[in-house]
Every structure is written in structure tokens, then in C-alpha cells.
């Protein structure tokens, strides 16, 4: 049966409308020309998520550092908060809120580097959970226990210097 309707024909089974839940079987289950992780339906499947690593370690209040993304690895490309693919090496830092309050993440980068803020949602560090991006300072209101990942990434094969500083603001 190639038709979308079987009209009661015995032995006729319709393909699913989406690949969701069938990712990883190496078949084009919904017959849209795409299989598994190449199919947009599988974008949130845990086996298909791009992952990032913690090249910069864990940071919090009063952290300040000047670095280059050249020491990172190119793992994450498609951030949901940035329409431009980020194919350069990224440097990733983990921030776990030790207390509630407003935080300023100071950022300066060159050659198109941007700071992407990813919120931990139980899937680990993935650009699918990007909440904002900027090429300058970002302010966040954190709640004790919140976990964020700060990913410094850029277009193409950019390798450039950047500085990052985290200031917990007293209100």
C-alpha cells in the first residue's frame, strides 16, 4: 500500500506520520526520504542530540578568564537560539547556581565568536536547550540549583580570543 488511505483493504498498513519513537532503526518509517537522525522528527531524540563537552570546567561567581576557543572541540553546530550554524571549536563552561540572584556574564569575543547560554533540562549539555545568545554581556536570574552551560562558539573554522567574567550581583 503506497497510498495514504487503505480504504479497508486487508493487509494494508499506513506508514506513521512521523519518525518519532522509531529513531535508530535505520529505516525511513514515515517515508519522507529521511532516516533516523537525519529526519527532523528525530531532532529531540536523545540518541540524535548534538552534545557539548565541558572544556572550560565549572565556574561561578567572581570567575574571570581570557582564553581562545582553539583548545575546544567542534561538537555543537545547531543552537536553537542562533540561526547561523556554529561550526568552529567551542569552549563550554558549566554554571551551577549556589544561590538565587541576578548574574552578569561579561563576554567579549573577536572574529564572530558568540556566547550561547544552554539550560540543563535533564538531557545534558545540548545546543537544543539554548535560551539566549549574545556577542556581549548577558544577564540571567538564577535560582539555587539551576544548571546552565556557557558555550563560546563561532562560524566556520574561527579560532579567536575571548574573555568571560561572571559577576553575582547583590540586589
Image: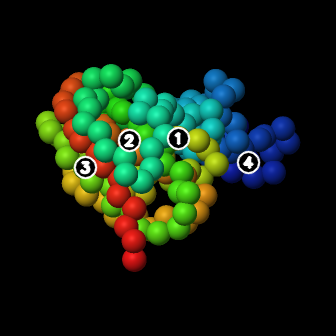
Residues at marks 3 and 4, CA–CA distance in whole angstroms:
58 Å
Mark 3 or mark 2: whose residue is earlier in sequence? 3
Q: Which residue is mark 4?
A: 6
Image quarter where the N terminus lies is: top right
Say what secondary structure mark 1 lies in: loop
Residue 57 horizontal side relative to residue 13, left or right: left
Residues at marks 1 and 4, CA–CA distance in whole angstroms:
43 Å
Q: Nearer the viewer, residue 105 or 150?
A: 105
Q: Residues within 10 Å of mark 2 (few under 14, many from 20)?
A: many
Residue 26 horizontal side relative to residue 105, left or right: right
In this rendering, which labeled residue sits more in front, label 3 or label 1?
Answer: 3
Give me the residue at 58% from left, 41% from top.
Answer: 124
Q: Position of residue 152 (x, y in %)?
A: 32, 40
Residue 1 horizontal side relative to residue 90, left or right: right
Q: Residue farthest to the bottom?
A: 171
Give me the residue at 43% from left, 29% from top.
Answer: 55
Q: Which residue is mark 3?
A: 107
Residues at marks 1 and 2, CA–CA distance in whole angstroms:
10 Å
Image quarter where the C terminus lies is: bottom left
Quadrant in which residue 153 is drawn:
top left
Mark 3 or mark 4: whose residue is earlier in sequence? 4
Mark carried by residue 151: 2
Mark 1 or mark 2: whose residue is earlier in sequence? 1
Mark carried by residue 73: none
Mark 2 or mark 4: whose residue is earlier in sequence? 4
Q: Nearer the viewer, residue 116 or 101?
A: 101
Q: Which residue is mark 1?
A: 125
Amino acid at each position: 500500500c503506497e497510498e495514504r488511505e487503505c480504504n479497508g483493504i486487508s493487509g494494508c498498513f499506513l506508514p506513521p506520520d512521523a519518525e518519532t519513537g522509531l529513531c535508530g532503526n535505520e529505516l525511513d518509517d514515515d517515508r519522507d526520504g529521511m532516516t533516523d537522525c537525519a529526519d527532523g522528527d528525530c531532532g529531540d531524540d536523545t540518541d540524535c542530540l548534538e552534545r557539548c563537552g565541558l572544556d572550560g570546567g565549572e565556574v561561578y561567581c567572581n570567575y574571570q578568564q581570557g582564553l581562545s576557543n582553539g583548545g575546544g572541540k567542534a561538537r555543537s553546530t545547531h543552537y536553537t537560539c542562533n540561526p547561523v550554524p556554529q561550526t568552529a571549536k567551542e569552549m563550554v563552561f558549566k554554571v551551577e547556581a549556589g544561590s538565587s540572584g541576578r548574574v552578569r556574564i561579561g563576554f567579549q569575543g573577536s572574529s564572530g565568536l558568540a556566547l550561547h547560554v544552554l539550560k540543563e533540562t535533564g538531557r545534558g549539555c545540548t545546543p537544543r536547550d539554548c535560551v539566549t545568545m549574545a556577542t556581549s554581556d548577558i544577564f540571567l536570574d538564577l535560582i539555587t540549583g539551576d544548571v546552565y552551560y556557557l558555550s563560546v562558539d563561532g562560524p566556520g573554522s574561527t579560532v579567536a580570543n575571548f574573555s568571560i567574567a561572571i559577576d553575582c550581583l547583590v540586589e
